[in-house]
Image (spheres, rainbow, N blue to C red):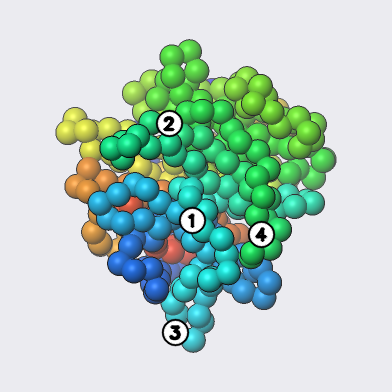
Amino acid sequence: MGKYTVSALLKAHREKTRSVLENKRLSFINIEGQDVYNPAYPIMLEEKLVLPARVERRESEVSRIVMFEQDQVQDIWKPIRDFPTTNLQDPFWIQLDTMLLLGGVHVDFSPSGLVQSWNTVFLTYNSLKDTSLFFTGPKGMKDLRICSLPCGKIALFTRPQGKNKGGIGQIGYSLLDSLHDLTINAVENAPLLNIFSEEEWGGVNHAQVLPDGTLGVLGHIACFSSDMHRHYYPMTFVIDPLSGYLVKEPSIILERRDLLPGPSKRPDLQDVIFPGGCVLKNDISILYLGVGDVEVQKVVFKNLFA
C-alpha cells in the first residue's frame, strides 16, 4: 500500500471536475454569540431532525456538544433545550445494529487553558434527555471510529500518534468479532494502513457500509505549511472490510476555495475543512463540514464513493 501526500492528492483533485449540486452555509440561533462548527450529520430522533455540533467562543477551545433541531420553515437550526450539554469536541454518530452512539473528543486543559491531553469518548444515546458512557479510548487518540458489518463483525478505525505508533497521525484498521472485543488493547494494537507520509497526518471521520459490502470512508488528510498554518482536506476512500485492502484509493474531494468564503477562528485555521459526516441517498452524497473552525457548510455531490 503506497503513501499518499497532500500535494499529489491536491494536484489530482484540481485536474478533475467534480459536480457540486448544492453548497450552503447553515444558520444557527440561540447560541449567545458563540461559533458552531465541526458537526456530525443530521438524523431523525424522536420526530426531530437532529444535528450535533461543536459550540465554543471564538477566543477559546473549551467547547461543548449541542444538539440542534431544524426549523424547516425558517431554514435554521436551534438548540434542543432538554438535551444535557456534553463537554466534548467534534461530535459524530455511530449507528450500530443494536444501539446508537454519540461520540466526541474529551480534552483536558491546564489551569491556564492550554490543551494537555485528549481522547475519544463513545456515549450510548438513550434519549434526548439521557446519554451514558459506553467506551473511553486511549489518551492521545482522536478519530476513533467503529462500524457494524453485515457479517456481524465490527470494523475498527484508529489514529495513533507518537514515535513507533504512527508519527503525526496514521490510520489503523482491524476487525473485531463483536463489541465485547472493543478494548484499549484492541485499539492500541490495530495494524496501521500507513497511507500518509511521515510529515503529514489524517484520520477517519465517518465509515459506512456501501451497497456492495465494502466500506466507504470519509476522512481527512492534513499538513502544515512553512508558516505553520494548518491545511485540512476532506478525502474519501473505499476499503474491503475483511482484508483491510483499499478498493478505491484516497482522493481529496474539496479544498477551501471550492466552498463559500467566510471567516476563520485564527489566520492559521483559514484552510481547515473538517468533514463531520456523509449522508448517502441513492446516487447523492450530502456532506456536512466544519469550515475555518467557525461555521458549518453543507455540500451536495454526486456519489463520492462511486
Name the residue rendered at 45%, 80% in the picture. Answer: 75
Sequence-first tag of 2 and 1: 1
Gap between marks 3 and 2, in whole Å?
40 Å
The reply, left or right, for residue 165 in relation to residue 246 is left
CB contact under 8 Å: marks 4 and 2: no
Gap between marks 3 and 1, in whole Å?
23 Å
Q: Count neighbours of disc 1 (C-alpha within 10 A) and say few if under 14, some if 14 to 19, many if 20 or more.
A: many
Measuring from the top left, give residue 241's x and y in whole percent: 70, 35
27, above or below 257, in the image: below
Judged by depth in the image, the label closer to the viewer, 3 or 2, is 2
Measuring from the top left, give residue 139's x and y in whole percent: 51, 28
Gap between marks 4 and 2, in whole Å?
26 Å
* Three-letter amino acid code at the position of disc 2: Ser
Give the numbered dot on residue 130: 4
* Three-letter amino acid code at the position of disc 4: Asp
Q: Mark 3 points at which residue?
A: 74
Along the line of sight, the residue nearer the viewer: 141 or 302: 141
Query: Of all residues shown, which one is farthest toward the bottom?
Result: 73
Query: Of all residues shown, which one is farthest toward the top?
Result: 164
Q: Can residue 286 be seen in this view?
A: no
Q: Mark 2 points at which residue?
A: 117
Q: Is residue 200 visible?
A: yes
Judged by depth in the image, the label closer to the viewer, 3 or 1, is 1
Q: Name the residue under label 1.
A: 65
Judged by depth in the image, the label closer to the viewer, 3 or 4, is 4
Q: Count neighbours of disc 3 (C-alpha within 10 A) and say few if under 14, some if 14 to 19, many if 20 or more.
A: few
Gap between marks 1 and 4, in whole Å?
14 Å
Quadrant showing the N terminus = top right
83, above or below 100, in the image: below
Name the residue rendered at 65%, 38% in the picture. Answer: 135
